[in-house]
Image: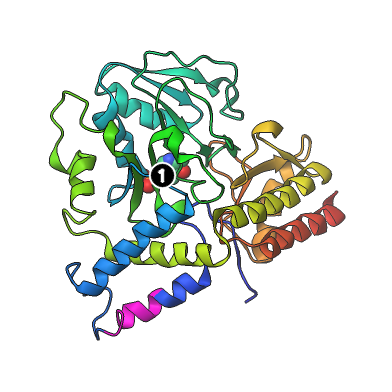
């Protein structure tokens, strides 16, 4: 069996050192003689892991004073609801750039007045809407910075007259972000920051406590801030792996360094998609994601789709089948995916063109 090149959309490829260190901790957590699976989250060494992980988030994303980082269960999907519960009082606007954005909007609508300020549904979310105006009387404007299914991304923090809330599930830690522009950033870890089972929320603390509704204890960010994400038993294994992933990221130079690597990977693959006569990209060029690269067979070549998928899988490409709502192919080039992985995929595309082009 050759080395697998993993392009899964999520859960994602994780750095090998994070996996190896986790295996050690599963056997013996920090020399305690107890497996990570069996430690109490009140164990002293565990506090240190939580503290380290919080500090790494703050350092890697240059999170300013006045923000807290919390680790939560329920994935990004629960954050759709928590964001609205904690911040929607009168009116909220959403940028509808895909099904995740729509799901976030649905939760807000269930609680109050929330609507799509702009949408790209007319072209199956293949672009990011532009030229819309954000109403100045919104409690917040919600964006999904990277649209995992369609391969579009808002790569520059937008200007907004109202506080921004962002679902950054699939591009957090892939590029620098000006956190001060947001009152809430959330992400399920499993796309770029760790394994499934934990979500991270970066919350502006003085923006909390302004809504009049009753907030259930578990759905109030203040509960988790006050208890340092240990109000209830945290997902210790997932947090441990996330911490190891962040340590790896810091070790290779942090978010700016990985961004340069990510841009190069994406440019390499997009260049091949644009050059290769058998393939064509699906996302508007100016909105192309550097994390999820979507492409389909070129017009007239559609009947080669299944054959290419089989051809690529036989050559150790993993996870390149596109989401069913877009079809074709999607290569997710998250942080732990390397330039070599991308070049291996490009080589397979070129080989296929030689025999079928
Ligand atoms: C995967 C994904 C989600 C859903 O995440 P869960 O953690 O599975 O709830 C939400 N938003 C985006 C952008 C995603 O890619």
In depth, the one of 75 and 218 nearer the eye is 218
| Residue 36: percent from left, percent from top | 28, 74
**Magenta-colored stretch includes residue 189:** no
| Residue 247: percent from left, percent from top | 46, 66
Q: Residue at x 42, y 47 (%)?
A: 63
| Residue 204: percent from left, percent from top | 33, 38
Question: Which residue position is annotated with label 1?
Answer: 64
Q: Which residue is drawn at 52% across and 37% down?
A: 147
Q: In which quarter of the image is the N terminus?
A: bottom right
Question: Looking at the image, can residue 132 be seen?
Answer: yes
Q: Classify mark 1: residues with Cα within 10 Å, few (<14), some (14-19) or many (20+).
A: few
What span is colored magenta in the figure? 22-31
In depth, the one of 98 and 264 nearer the eye is 264
Q: Is residue 110 left or right of residue 144?
A: left
In depth, the one of 350 and 86 nearer the eye is 86
Question: Looking at the image, can residue 284 be seen?
Answer: no
Q: In this view, does 91 lie to the left or right of 136?
A: left
Reply above or below: 335 against 111: below
Reply above or below: 97 against 266: above
Q: Residue furthest front?
A: 65
Q: Which residue is drawn at 57% across and 27% down?
A: 124
């Amino acid at each position: 069996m050759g080395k697998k090149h993993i392009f899964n959309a999520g859960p994602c490829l994780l750095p090998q050192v994070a996996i190896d260190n986790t295996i050690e901790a599963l056997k013996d957590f920090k020399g305690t003689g107890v497996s990570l699976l069996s430690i109490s989250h009140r164990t002293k060494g565990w506090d240190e892991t939580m503290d380290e992980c919080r500090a790494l988030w703050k350092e890697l994303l240059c999170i300013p004073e006045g923000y807290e980082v919390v680790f939560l269960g329920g994935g990004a999907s629960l954050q759709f609801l928590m964001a609205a519960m904690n911040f929607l009082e009168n009116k909220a606007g959403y940028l509808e750039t895909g099904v995740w954005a729509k799901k976030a909007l649905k939760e807000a609508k269930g609680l109050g007045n929330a609507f799509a300020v702009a949408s790209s549904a007319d072209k199956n979310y293949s672009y990011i809407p532009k030229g819309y105006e954000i109403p100045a009387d919104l409690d917040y404007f919600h964006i999904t910075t990277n649209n995992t299914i369609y391969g579009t991304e808002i790569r520059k923090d937008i200007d907004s007259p109202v506080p921004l809330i962002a679902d950054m599930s699939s591009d957090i830690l892939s590029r620098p972000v000006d956190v001060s522009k947001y009152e809430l950033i959330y992400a399920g870890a499993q796309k770029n920051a760790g394994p499934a089972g934990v979500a991270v929320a970066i919350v502006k603390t003085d923006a909390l406590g302004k809504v009049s509704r009753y907030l259930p204890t578990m759905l109030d960010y203040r509960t988790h801030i006050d208890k340092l994400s240990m109000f209830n038993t945290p997902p210790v294994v997932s947090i441990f792996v996330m911490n190891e992933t962040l340590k790896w990221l810091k070790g290779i130079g942090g978010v700016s360094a990985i961004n340069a690597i990510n841009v190069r990977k994406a440019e390499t693959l997009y260049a091949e998609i644009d050059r290769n006569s058998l393939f064509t990209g699906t996302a508007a060029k100016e909105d192309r994601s550097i994390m999820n690269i979507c492409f389909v067979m070129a017009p007239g070549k559609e009947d080669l789709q299944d054959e290419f998928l089989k051809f690529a899988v036989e050559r150790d490409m993993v996870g390149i089948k596109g989401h069913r709502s877009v079809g074709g192919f999607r290569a997710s080039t998250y942080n732990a995916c390397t330039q070599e992985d991308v070049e291996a995929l490009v080589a397979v595309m070129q080989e296929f063109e030689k025999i079928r082009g």
